[in-house]
């Protein structure tokens, strides 16, 4: 029983380690969304802002959300191991992926999570009617919300 508790504690420590990058990703994503809000105000005050900077904000925000989503899946995998939940269809940790079939499954699980975190902001940025600046602001904000959601979900796993 003591060995099992020590193993669970080790898995929980790995889950915390995987989750450690997620607050930074939320911060990066929120900062990019905030910068996207500041650029129109600067333009209104007469400062020339390159549209590249405005377009870069949702890209940075979405990339941070994707990185946070991948970290969230690893946190979930380690948390399930800490709880002793081992089944065939569970989420697999990167550390466990020793065979090509397991590596493929890990890649599919991470890709699915990244897609769930990034596709909404990309679709909103591309398909929403309105000016480029408005769409960039909304897309960056949606990506920031996805990053924050993934962090909250990871916190419930390790709590």
Image (spheres, grey):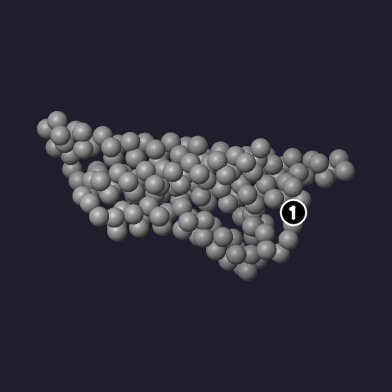
Residue furthest front as drawn: 129
- Where residue 37 appears, x then y in whole percent? 28, 37
Q: Is residue 64 visible?
A: no
Image height of 42 relative to 134, above or below? above
Q: Quadrant of residue 44?
A: top left
Q: Determine whether, in the image, residue 148 is placed left or right of residue 11.
A: left
| Outermost residue toward the left in this view | 46
Which quadrant of the figure contains the N terminus?
top right
Q: Residue at x 28, y 47 (%)?
A: 136
Q: Position of residue 49 (x, y in %)?
A: 18, 39
Snapshot quadrant of residue 26: top left
Which residue is at a point 63% across and 49% down the rendered structure image? 76
Residue at image x 14%, y 30%? 45
Quadrant occupied by the C terminus: top right
Q: Name the residue tied to disc 1.
A: 85
- Find numbered disc 1 in the image and state the secondary structure of the residue it sits on: loop
Question: x, y (%) of residue 150?
Answer: 52, 45
Q: Is residue 157 visible?
A: yes
Q: Position of residue 30 (x, y in %)?
A: 39, 38
Mark 1 is surrounded, within 10 Å at the Cα level, by few (under 14), some (14 to 19) or many (20 or more) other residues, namely few
Which residue is the extreme one toward the right? 1
Give the mark count.
Answer: 1
- Specify whether 129 is left or right of 84: left
Task: Kindly identify the residue that appears in the image at 67 percent across and 47 percent down.
Answer: 79
Of residue 104 and residue 32, the one placed in the foreground of this image is 32
């Amino acid at each position: 029983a003591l060995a099992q508790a020590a193993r669970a504690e080790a898995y929980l420590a790995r889950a915390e380690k995987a989750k450690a990058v997620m607050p930074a990703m939320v911060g990066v994503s929120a900062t990019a969304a905030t910068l996207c809000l500041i650029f129109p105000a600067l333009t209104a005050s007469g400062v020339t802002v390159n549209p590249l900077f405005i377009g870069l904000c949702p890209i940075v925000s979405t990339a941070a959300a994707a990185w946070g989503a991948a970290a969230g899946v690893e946190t979930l995998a380690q948390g399930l191991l800490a709880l002793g939940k081992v089944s065939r269809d569970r989420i697999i940790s990167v550390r466990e992926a020793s065979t090509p079939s397991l590596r493929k499954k890990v890649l599919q699980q991470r890709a699915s999570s990244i897609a769930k975190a990034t596709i909404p902001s990309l679709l909103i940025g591309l398909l929403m009617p309105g000016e480029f600046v408005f769409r960039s602001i909304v897309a960056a904000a949606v990506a920031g919300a996805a990053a924050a959601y993934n962090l909250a979900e990871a916190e419930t796993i390790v709590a």
